[in-house]
Image (spheres, grey):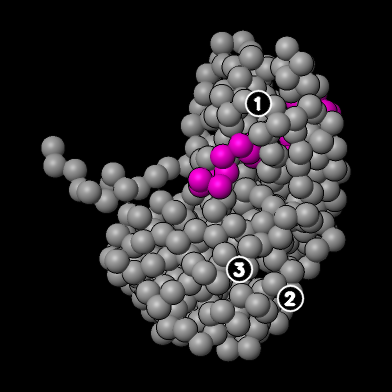
Amino acid sequence: MPIADRMHRMGTEAAFGVRARARALETAGRDVIHLEMGEPDFPTPAHIVEAAVTALRDGHTGYAPAAGFLPLRETIAADVAATRKIPVDPTQVVVCPGGKPVIFYTLLAVVNPGDEVVYPDPGFPIFESMTHAVGAVGRPYHPGSGTETRPDLEGLAEAITEKTRLVILNSPGNPTGVVHHADEIEKIAALCRDRDLCVLSDEIYSRILYGAEHVSISRCDGMAGKTVILDGFSKTYSMTGWRLGYAVAPPELAPLYEKLMTNSNSCAVNFVQRAAVAALQGPQDEVARRVDVFRERRDALVEGLRSLPGVTCDLPEGSFFAFADVRGTGRGARTLADALLEEAGVACVEGPAFGRAGEGFLRFSFTADVERIREAVRRMRNLLAG
């Protein structure tokens, strides 16, 4: 069977493989603490579920428009305009089945084979994977990891060349939990403003913050017309399995995203889109409460990790990830991650799954109950002591 070269260039997402291994151990009777997936452990808020059920009962099970249900696009436009402090027209919004299509569509829309794409490393693995899949040249930069390690703006400046067609930002970031501060965003905008390139700003964790402010590069002078915002409902509203994300794109790009939706997915699920209107227009107090819970878990996890021999950990300012430096343990990241899962029953993801700069690190998701997190730290301490 002939296999296209692009399939050999395409990577994957390691967290799903770790979860499959963890589930197999549980099937065999082992107790596993799940700190591997970027998935909130809270249920979808009841009013969102009820909106979906109502939409189903009302017969909204057919095709939706390729760019999305107009009332949802209008609701998203109003929400993004309010939260990013920029004008947004509903025609700029394209609704997709999750956030990953926005990454793929952006690369297909603006990048030709041989062009350069600048992306964070360590970073969400699909950035690098799809860059290589479309035949582009990857130029990584370090995005920082929290309060102590800030984005490497000098490295970013060096990575951008005349061949750069896309710069990818992710703040708050996966896997490091870094939040780019306003002055850093302004400096990044200065690097991009006068160049013939596009910025993809992945802002999927923009509402999961711990004292930091989310600043979108789209609000910087001259950047709204060069920036695609990626956001969605999975993380904020515990809707990972609902598969709903969106792009807010410059007017000349939005029709291309709609064309790509028509060619790939036809549309996002009709009744899910109607539930998403309820998510944005409904009460937000549950979101705030859950962020407070994540903060407690973050503090417990980072404090616990810092107490382990040979382990240090920066304090993430956003998302629900902690990126721990385990080089002082004398064990490689993959070796230690395997031992934690197989011997201690703690599932996490090895740093190299997020790029070369992740070597020597492990990513932990604080998406488990705080007592389970403390138990995970106890198990890790026992393993390292042995």
Q: Residue at x 49, y 58 (%)?
A: 140
Q: Which region of the structure is painted magenta?
A: 354-376
Task: Give the answer, above or below, for where 33 lies relative to 344.
Answer: below
Q: CA distance from mark 2 to mark 1?
A: 37 Å
Tell me the residue at 69%/52% (across/down). 145
Badge 2 or badge 3: first in the primary sequence: 3
- Look at the numbered disc 3 and give the secondary structure of its residue: helix
Residue position marked by numbered label 2 in the rendering? 183
Q: Which residue is mark 1?
A: 330
Under mark 1, the amino acid is Gly
| Sequence order check, earlier mark of 3 and 1 | 3
Q: Residues within 10 Å of mark 3 (few under 14, many from 20)?
A: few
- The reply to whether discs 2 and 3 touch (Cβ–Cβ < 8 Å) is no
Q: Is residue 273 magenta?
A: no
In the depicted structure, whether residue 380 falls above or below residue 166 = above
Disc 2 secondary structure class = helix
Q: Nearer the viewer, residue 14 or 290?
A: 14
Residue at the spot of label 3: 154
Is residue 373 found inside the magenta-colored segment of the image?
Answer: yes
Question: Which residue type does callout 3 highlight?
Answer: Glu
Which quadrant would residue 317 be assigned to in this image?
Answer: bottom right
* Residue 290 visible here: no
Question: Which disc, if any, is residue 172?
Answer: none
Q: Is residue 41 above or below residue 380?
A: below
State the quadrant of the N terminus.
Answer: top left
- Rendering coords of residue 72 (x, y %): 57, 71
Q: Amino acid at mark 2?
A: Asp
